[in-house]
Image (cartoon, rainbow, N blue to C red):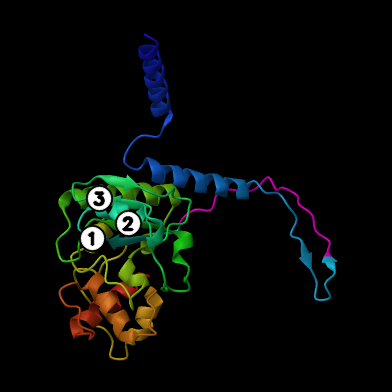
């Protein structure tokens, strides 16, 4: 009888412990995420003076006075990627393993499911090295969206439908300008091809997310400097061929050779005037 009672007590204790433990396949990574967020929150709560010294080593008088006029920093760009992996499960695994050092705010599955992985106000590790206009630290001011796609296949209708809904919410929530919806290829033309020539940029532009060329194109002027036009749009032209390829992946899509045809020049001339 004593053994039965002891077993019963152990069973109840085990059930209590289990009920207090986090559930789900990502319980452990969710716990790490919460721990990191708590650490950031403690940093935000710090109220301390600047603690400066001048060139002679003397302390500069300083104090802390809290202002009443402040707010959260918000994202100003959206960067779209493809995952280049076999499944959304594989991508989520990649983003929940420390050694990879990569992440994104959102992942969009082939069936349209949207997985939110980083709070919009926090910095995800998605853009890496690159340049767009004067921006070099894109991670600090952008939302990263990864779409489950290997780069060699069309995007599903469900994905694009969910993506458009997500972009609409982000644009309204953070007042993101139409020009600031770009691809990873645009920001990092020397390194990245995503979201690639299959991505429906025209459809996004029709909804106000990015720009697209008009149906009727004006002939580009004889003195048209395409390198300057690419730079004015935002492209890093330090490797001009890479910038041309990135532009064509986004705005031409039928040809991604590092050479501009007359049609390509007409498209570029039309597009750069929108920026």
Residue in view at x 36 percent, y 52 percent: 96
In this view of the protein, which residue sits in the foreground, 63 or 41?
A: 41
In this view of the protein, which residue sits in the foreground, 164 or 191?
A: 191
In this view of the protein, which residue sits in the foreground, 131 or 1?
A: 1
Q: Is mark 2 on a helix, strand or loop?
A: helix
Where is residue 100? Give x, y as percent. 37, 61
- For residue 85, which numbered disc appears in the image? 1
Kindly report the distance in space between the C-alpha atoms of the residues bearing marks 1 and 2. Answer: 9 Å
- Magenta-colored span: 60-75
Residue 73 inside the magenta-drawn segment:
yes
Q: Quadrant of residue 275?
A: bottom left
Kindly report the distance in space between the C-alpha atoms of the residues bearing marks 3 and 2. Answer: 9 Å
- For residue 89, which numbered disc appears in the image? 3
In this view of the protein, which residue sits in the foreground, 20 or 50?
A: 20
Q: What element carries label 1?
A: loop
Q: Furthest residue to the top?
A: 1
Read off the residue under disc 2.
94
Q: Quadrant of residue 222?
A: bottom left
Where is residue 191? Give x, y as percent. 33, 75
């Amino acid at each position: 009888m004593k053994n039965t009672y002891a077993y019963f007590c152990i069973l109840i204790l085990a059930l209590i412990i289990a009920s207090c433990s986090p559930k789900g396949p990502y319980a452990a990574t969710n716990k790490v995420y919460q721990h990191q967020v708590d650490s950031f929150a403690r940093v935000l709560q710090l109220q301390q003076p600047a603690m400066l010294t001048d060139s002679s080593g003397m302390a500069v008088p300083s104090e802390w006075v809290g202002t009443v006029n402040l707010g959260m920093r918000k994202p100003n760009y959206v960067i779209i990627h493809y995952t280049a992996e076999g499944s959304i499960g594989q991508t989520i695994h990649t983003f929940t393993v420390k050694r990879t050092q990569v992440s994104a705010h959102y992942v969009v599955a082939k069936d349209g499911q949207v997985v939110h992985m980083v709070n919009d106000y926090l910095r995800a590790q998605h853009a890496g090295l690159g340049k767009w206009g004067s921006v070099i630290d894109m991670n600090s001011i952008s939302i990263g969206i990864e779409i489950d796609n290997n780069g060699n296949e069309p995007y599903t209708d469900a994905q694009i439908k969910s993506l458009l809904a997500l972009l609409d919410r982000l644009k309204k929530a953070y007042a993101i300008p139409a020009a600031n919806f770009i691809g990873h290829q645009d920001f990092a033309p020397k390194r990245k091809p995503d979201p690639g020539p299959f991505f429906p940029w025209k459809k996004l532009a029709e909804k106000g997310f990015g720009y697209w060329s008009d149906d009727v194109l004006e002939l580009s002027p004889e003195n048209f400097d395409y390198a300057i036009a690419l730079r004015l749009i935002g492209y890093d032209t330090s490797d001009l061929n890479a910038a041309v390829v990135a532009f064509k992946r986004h705005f031409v899509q039928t040809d991604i050779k590092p050479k501009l045809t007359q049609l390509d020049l007409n498209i570029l001339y039309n597009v750069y005037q929108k920026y």
